[in-house]
Image (spheres, rainbow, N blue to C red):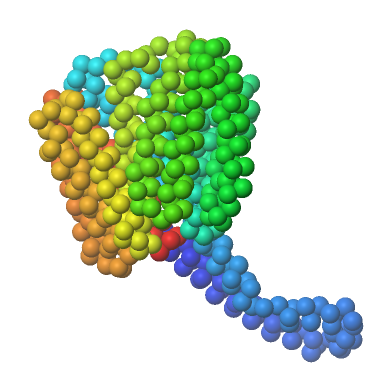
């Protein structure tokens, strides 16, 4: 919607410029008539050559370039909006929700430094998997602008992860970022090979990823002073590589089961890689609070909410491009995430699991309604979905206030969900503009 206004503004500017051009042409004619020497100047070889160059320009070239620039900007906005929606729930929603649920359950350590370290590392690694998958999907689907834009969002995630490593080993931040970027390049090379049916290219990429595992194992063993063994990192990264490669192969083959494979790849880095690395880094840096119920709760809520955003965005992307089978498969994977979130709520209020799950599924349905309305140009449908989402915020606020005995207030929950709804709606608008 915002992009449409920007483009309309650009069109208005172009219209104004054309009037200015007409004025310049009139002034030039008047000047030529008043200056006898103008005929001599116009007849010189240089002037003739310049006139020929101007006359040979194709007006459609500028229009094509402007269209391509606009499409590129739309793609950049789309995937950055998805990343921002995911970051919102990890940075804003999760800490508040975990604090309230933790208080209600009597969990200690939710706000500890160790809990923050583990949550940040887990969410960033999970974000890497989802953003990499989104990026590589655009490559497989022959969407160059979307691929480049998604790659920029993936690069932002890489910088955040490098910053986490740099907080423990500042002099090794650049080395880690280079190492991490290389392994992403190998995934890109593998995807290109899968797309082209080039087994040699795939084998070369796998060889590069195998060497990366060894290098990363040595790297983390060094910066943690041996708190984590190189072979343990290498083994964990083997699973990371295998699960991501399986996802790429699934998407390349058009297998709708790839959405479940993607979730498995993301689950691995949260449950295995992040927790092990967080423990080792905390030991090396003398940070307390990683191994607490509160830390586990914060990490679980943060990554489950972030996964909700990424899987919802991926599912709605399939709806935007008109792939119904892929949408249904991605929606089923999204529902598995919804059930995981319901299990977390049930840890505090076991008898409220089903009530929460119904409430949560409803709000996902409203996002689907909004997307369908957007695609159909049905303003009544989109407004109806927004109205339903506004009511959902109030209902969810009342729900969490009830199950936490007031540790979470209705207004606070509803206010936090406003940011969630707004960022996801922005992402839907931007993805719709870029890919529809």
Res. 296 in view? yes
Task: From the top left corner, tell me how far across and down residue 321 is, in percent.
Answer: 38, 62
Res. 217 image quadrant: top right
Whether residue 1 is situated above or below residue 268 in the rendered picture = below
The residue shown at (49%, 20%) is 232
The residue shown at (13%, 38%) is 354
Task: From the top left corner, tell me how far across and down residue 69 is, in percent.
Answer: 56, 62
Whether residue 305 is situated above or below residue 50 in the rendered picture = above
Given residues 160 and 246, the one toward you in this image is 246
The residue shown at (12%, 38%) is 355
Whether residue 64 is situated above or below residue 407 in the rendered picture = below
Which part of the image, by quadrant, shows the N terminus? Answer: bottom left
Which part of the image, by quadrant, shows the C terminus? Answer: bottom left
Res. 183 image quadrant: top right
Res. 213 image quadrant: top right
Q: How many marks?
A: 0
Asked if residue 326 lies left or right of residue 120, the reply is left
Question: In the displayed image of the protein, which residue is found farthest to the front?
Answer: 199
Given residues 127 and 56, the one toward you in this image is 127
Res. 167 in view? no
Task: From the top left corner, tell me how far across and down residue 255 is, in percent.
Answer: 38, 53
The residue shown at (26%, 29%) is 97
Given residues 126 and 208, the one toward you in this image is 208
Asked if residue 21 lies left or right of residue 263, the reply is right
Task: From the top left corner, tell me how far across and down residue 367 is, in percent.
Answer: 27, 53
Whether residue 152 is situated above or below residue 254 in the rendered picture = above
């Amino acid at each position: 919607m915002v992009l449409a206004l920007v483009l309309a503004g650009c069109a208005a500017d172009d219209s104004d410029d054309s009037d200015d051009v007409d004025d310049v042409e009139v002034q030039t004619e008047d000047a030529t008539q008043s200056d006898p020497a103008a005929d001599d100047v116009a007849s010189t070889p240089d002037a003739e050559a310049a006139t020929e160059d101007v006359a040979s320009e194709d007006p459609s070239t500028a229009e094509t370039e402007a269209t391509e620039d606009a499409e590129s900007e739309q793609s950049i906005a789309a995937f950055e909006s998805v990343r921002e929606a995911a970051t919102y729930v990890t940075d804003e929603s999760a800490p508040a929700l975990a604090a309230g649920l933790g208080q209600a359950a009597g969990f200690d350590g939710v706000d500890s430094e160790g809990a923050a370290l583990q949550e940040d590392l887990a969410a960033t690694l999970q974000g890497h998997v989802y953003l990499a998958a989104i990026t590589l999907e655009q490559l497989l689907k022959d969407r160059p602008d979307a691929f480049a834009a998604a790659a920029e969002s993936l690069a932002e995630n890489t910088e955040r992860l490098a910053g986490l490593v740099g907080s423990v080993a500042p002099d090794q931040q650049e080395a880690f970022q280079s190492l991490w970027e290389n392994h992403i390049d190998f995934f890109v090379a593998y995807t290109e090979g899968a797309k082209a049916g080039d087994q040699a290219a795939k084998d070369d990429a796998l060889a590069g990823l195998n060497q990366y595992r060894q290098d990363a194992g040595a790297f983390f063993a060094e910066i943690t002073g041996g708190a984590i063994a190189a072979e343990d990192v290498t083994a964990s990264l083997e699973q990371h590589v295998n699960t991501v490669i399986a996802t790429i192969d699934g998407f390349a083959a058009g297998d709708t089961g790839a959405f479940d494979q993607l979730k498995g790849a993301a689950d691995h880095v949260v449950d295995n890689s992040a927790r092990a690395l967080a423990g080792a880094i905390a030991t090396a840096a003398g940070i307390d609070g990683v191994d607490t119920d509160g830390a586990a709760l914060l990490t679980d809520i943060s990554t489950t909410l972030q996964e909700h955003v990424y899987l919802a965005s991926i599912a709605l992307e399939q709806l935007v491009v008109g792939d119904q089978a892929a949408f249904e498969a991605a929606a089923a994977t999204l529902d598995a995430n919804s059930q995981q979130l319901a299990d977390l709520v049930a840890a505090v209020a076991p008898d409220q699991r089903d009530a929460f799950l119904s409430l949560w599924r409803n709000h996902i349905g409203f996002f689907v309604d909004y997307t369908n309305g957007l695609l159909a140009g049905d303003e009544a449908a989109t407004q109806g979905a927004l109205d339903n989402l506004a009511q959902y915020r109030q209902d969810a606020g009342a729900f969490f206030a009830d199950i936490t005995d007031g540790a979470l207030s209705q207004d606070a929950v509803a206010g936090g969900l406003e940011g969630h709804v707004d960022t996801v709606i922005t992402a839907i608008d931007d993805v719709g503009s870029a890919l529809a």
